[in-house]
């Protein structure tokens, strides 16, 4: 009897999985720094209770201690003022990735000129690569008139120090438009993508669920999408035009939308 070629068998099995559209686990959770500690367990946001999630972001470089350690923590320097904290917390937070800047193209407190971002990137962020840390680009908004030009200038200025991942945000109601936009950015830079914030701006929960399904099911199947983070698992963050997108209720319980995100 001929000995089976197990290496070939494993390779073929992997190929079948990919061609069949079997999804990878890549969903993430967003926990604001002021989250109620008990919510992350009693609300159903542990890895065991939220098996579709594999990582979390708290918009800080320090870990949110009640978060399940089974989740990968992605550190963030949200603004230029938060870069200094990386030196304090990166030695102990176990993060293997840094997200650099949050919506620098948006007028307001997070706005930052491209030239300043490039200077900080080269002087303060790139050196983390020596420790094996992977780097996410500044996360631009989905306002294409602002975000795409900002990112284009940034990428043109760092040709020999490109990020490992492109970070994007998206708020809207049309899952097809989301897919088109994310694909457009991928085709521009051919780097894997993290959608570090996404939510529906619809006031109709049926529409919100349809948007979520269209976003997550599609992202799960794209090999070049590294992660997708729905906004948000929080009692208070979902206000204004994203109130229906909450994964957590005002009492800390997981919403039906949270159930869909965590388990479907």
Image (spheres, rainbow, N blue to C red):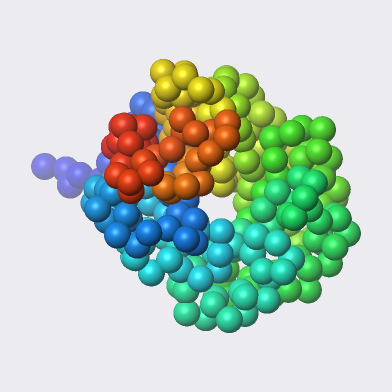
Task: Give whichever of 149, 8 is nearer the camera.
Answer: 149
| Depicted 264 relative to depicted 147: above or below | above
Going by the picture, which residue comes out furthest to the front?
251
Indicate the position of residue 36 as horizontal and vertical percent values: 37, 59
Task: Give whichever of 200, 13 is nearer the camera.
Answer: 200
Identify the residue shown where x is 27% and y is 41%: 9
Task: Give whichever of 174, 254 is nearer the camera.
Answer: 254
Indicate the position of residue 234 as horizontal and vertical percent values: 43, 48
Indicate the position of residue 86 as horizontal and vertical percent values: 61, 74
Going by the picture, which residue comes out furthest to the left?
1
Q: In which quarter of the image is residue 246?
A: top left
Q: How many marks?
A: 0
Identify the residue shown where x is 86% and y is 55%: 113
Indicate the position of residue 228 as horizontal and vertical percent values: 50, 42
| Quarter that holds the C terminus | top left
Left or right of 261 in this view: 126: right
Going by the picture, which residue comes out furthest to the right?
115
Q: Does any portion of residue 8 appear in the rendered image? A: no
Left or right of 18 in this view: 102: right
| Quarter that holds the N terminus | top left
Task: Give whichever of 92, 38 is nearer the camera.
Answer: 38
Q: Does any portion of residue 259 appear in the rendered image? A: yes
Identify the residue shown where x is 62% and y is 22%: 177
Identify the residue shown where x is 53% and y is 29%: 200
């Amino acid at each position: 009897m001929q000995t089976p070629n197990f290496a070939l068998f494993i390779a073929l099995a992997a190929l079948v999985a990919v061609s069949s559209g079997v999804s990878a686990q890549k969903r993430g959770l967003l926990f604001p720094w002021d989250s109620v500690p008990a919510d992350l367990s009693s609300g159903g946001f542990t890895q065991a209770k939220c098996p579709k999630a594999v990582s979390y972001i708290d918009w800080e470089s320090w870990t949110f201690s009640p978060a399940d350690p089974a989740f990968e923590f992605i550190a963030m320097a949200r603004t230029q003022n938060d870069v200094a904290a990386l030196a304090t917390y990166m030695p102990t937070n176990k993060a293997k990735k840094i997200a650099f800047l949050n919506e620098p193209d948006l007028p307001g407190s997070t706005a930052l000129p491209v030239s300043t971002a490039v200077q900080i990137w080269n002087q303060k962020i790139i050196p983390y690569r020596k420790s094996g840390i992977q780097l996410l680009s500044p996360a631009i908004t989905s306002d294409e008139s602002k975000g795409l030009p900002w990112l284009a200038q940034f990428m043109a200025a760092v040709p020999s120090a490109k990020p490992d991942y492109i970070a994007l945000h998206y708020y809207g109601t049309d899952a097809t438009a989301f897919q088109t936009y994310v694909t457009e950015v991928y085709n521009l830079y051919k780097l894997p993508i993290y959608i570090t914030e996404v939510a529906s701006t619809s006031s109709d929960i049926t529409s919100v669920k349809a948007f979520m399904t269209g976003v997550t099911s599609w992202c799960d199947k794209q090999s070049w999408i590294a992660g997708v983070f729905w906004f948000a698992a929080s009692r208070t963050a979902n206000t204004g035009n994203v109130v229906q997108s909450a994964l957590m209720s005002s009492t800390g319980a997981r919403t039906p939308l949270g159930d869909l995100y965590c388990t479907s």
